[in-house]
Image (cartoon, helix red, strand yellow):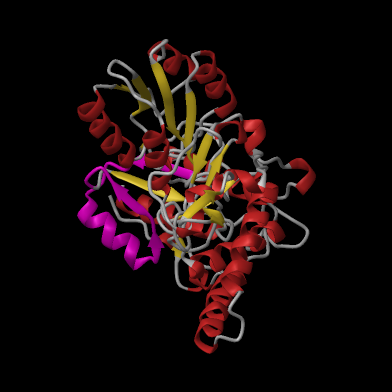
């Protein structure tokens, strides 16, 4: 079979029937109006943008000048505004003109995050890493031999490391639910949950295939068994609008360096207010002090800030504050509509090439994973040559693409063109 390069692929109308699906352009403009489109299937257009830049943000992401960057699920590129905030923080620290700049940034970031994601400020702590949250939760709980934790195989590796350790230390049982066609349902969790279940833990959006969980239903299941629900939100926050109170989740955490477009080192941790009284820190330090008492005694904070034992990483906090402001300006509903529609088109294009999908259909997230069936030693360099960035998983057999707010159909076409040229 003669290889198809990207240009030939995009102009062809006979490659695996791709011209018939909405996920691939063939040089004919999409004539549908914005009113005829929707967030699940239609073309993501907005009056302030264009077909090539639907959200009007590509100029804020210089990475788009060099790459079809479909890898935000790994590391999100910094927008110019966040780079400038980091520069300004470093400049202030260098000149020491405003010694309160760090404290101002953390107060502003806490307020912005609560407003953007439906949490009260006293329910938010800023940790250094997502994994810190689940470690704090586990440390605060009173475990007894025979208790169980329910997770599924689509979770991130940290969770398995943590609960395997808990199995050895406390004699708990880790119950791991297999996925079926990239999906784990609430009924699957219910079949593994009983009166000894203490915690259900999920990756709100799976890092492996983008599967998005129904948190309210899982929370109802957990609470019916007097258990808690924890959500690793690192692949969720920044991709769709949400209200943490309405999600009913007990705890959620995610770092800033992916879809929030901040930096490493600032991980907002949400603790539902009703748990603040019993939630204890797993380490202690000066930032937990609310009041200094005589005799080297102290009254400690009672809000979620009591989990912040030391100085935060103020640079990443400044980045987080600017990143959250940037997201507010774009609008979470617009981001979700654009990225989910484009991810759906990418999924259809990959499926039309005959590749095995790991991401289920009609999945409301921005991640698309598939078993490409190609030689990774050929595919990797081909992607690099075309300036396409994505992530290989499972020893190279699985390719994960992530559609960010700055991506457009041309980026998707470049990936599909590389794949078609190797089929």
Placement of 267 over or under 179, stated as above or below:
below
Asked if residue 192 lies left or right of residue 240, the reply is: left
Asked if residue 38 lies left or right of residue 95, the reply is: right
Placement of 355 over or under 290, stated as above or below:
above
User: Foreground residue, 297 or 147?
Assistant: 297
Q: Position of residue 177 (x, y in %)?
A: 34, 22
**Magenta-colored span:** 367-395
Residue 153 shown in magenta:
no
Look at the image and tell me whether residue 395 can be seen: yes
Q: Position of residue 131 (x, y in %)?
A: 38, 46
The residue sitting at 55% across, 58% down in the picture is 407
User: Foreground residue, 374 or 405?
Assistant: 405
Q: Which residue is at the far bottom?
A: 95
Asked if residue 9 lies left or right of residue 104, the reply is: left
The residue sitting at 63% across, 46% down in the picture is 122
The residue sitting at 23% across, 56% down in the picture is 378
- Residue 60, quarter of picture: bottom right
The residue sitting at 54% across, 55% down in the picture is 293
Q: Position of residue 48 (x, y in %)?
A: 76, 62
């Amino acid at each position: 079979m003669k290889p198809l390069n990207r240009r030939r692929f995009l102009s062809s109308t006979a490659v695996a029937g791709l011209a018939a699906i909405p996920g691939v352009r063939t040089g004919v403009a999409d004539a549908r109006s914005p009113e005829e489109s929707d967030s699940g299937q239609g073309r993501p257009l907005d009056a302030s943008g264009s077909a090539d830049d639907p959200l009007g943000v590509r100029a804020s992401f210089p990475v788009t000048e060099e790459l079809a960057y479909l890898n935000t699920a790994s590391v999100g590129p910094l927008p110019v505004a966040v780079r400038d905030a980091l520069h300004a923080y470093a400049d202030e620290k260098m000149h020491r003109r405003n010694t309160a700049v760090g404290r101002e940034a953390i107060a502003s970031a806490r307020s912005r995050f609560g407003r953007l994601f439906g949490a009260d400020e006293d329910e938010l702590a800023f940790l250094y890493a997502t994994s810190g949250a689940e470690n704090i939760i586990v440390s605060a709980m009173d475990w007894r031999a025979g208790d169980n934790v329910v997770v599924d195989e689509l979770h991130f590796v940290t969770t398995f490391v943590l609960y395997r350790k808990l199995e050895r230390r406390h004699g708990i049982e880790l119950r791991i639910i297999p996925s079926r066609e990239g999906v784990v349902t609430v009924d699957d969790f219910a079949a593994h949950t009983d009166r000894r279940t203490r915690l259900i833990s999920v990756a709100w959006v799976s890092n492996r295939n983008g599967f998005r969980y129904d948190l309210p239903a899982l929370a109802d299941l957990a609470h019916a068994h007097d258990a808690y629900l924890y959500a690793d939100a690192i692949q969720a926050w920044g991709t769709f609008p949400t209200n943490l109170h309405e999600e009913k989740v007990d705890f959620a955490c995610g770092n800033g360096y992916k879809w929030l477009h901040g930096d490493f080192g600032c991980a907002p941790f949400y603790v539902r207010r009703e748990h603040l009284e019993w939630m204890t820190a797993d380490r202690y330090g000066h930032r937990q002090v609310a009041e200094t008492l005589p005799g080297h005694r102290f009254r400690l904070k009672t809000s979620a800030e009591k989990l912040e034992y030391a100085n935060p990483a103020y640079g990443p906090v400044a980045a987080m504050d600017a990143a959250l402001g940037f997201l507010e300006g774009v609008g979470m509903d617009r981001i979700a509509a654009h990225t989910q529609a484009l991810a759906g088109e990418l999924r259809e294009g990959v499926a039309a090439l005959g590749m095995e999908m790991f991401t289920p259909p009609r999945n409301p997230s921005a991640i698309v994973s598939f078993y490409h069936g190609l030689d990774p030693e050929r595919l990797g360099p081909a992607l690099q040559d075309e300036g396409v960035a994505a992530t290989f998983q499972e020893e190279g057999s699985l390719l994960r693409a992530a559609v960010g707010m700055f991506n457009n159909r041309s980026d998707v076409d470049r990936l599909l063109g590389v794949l078609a040229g190797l089929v």
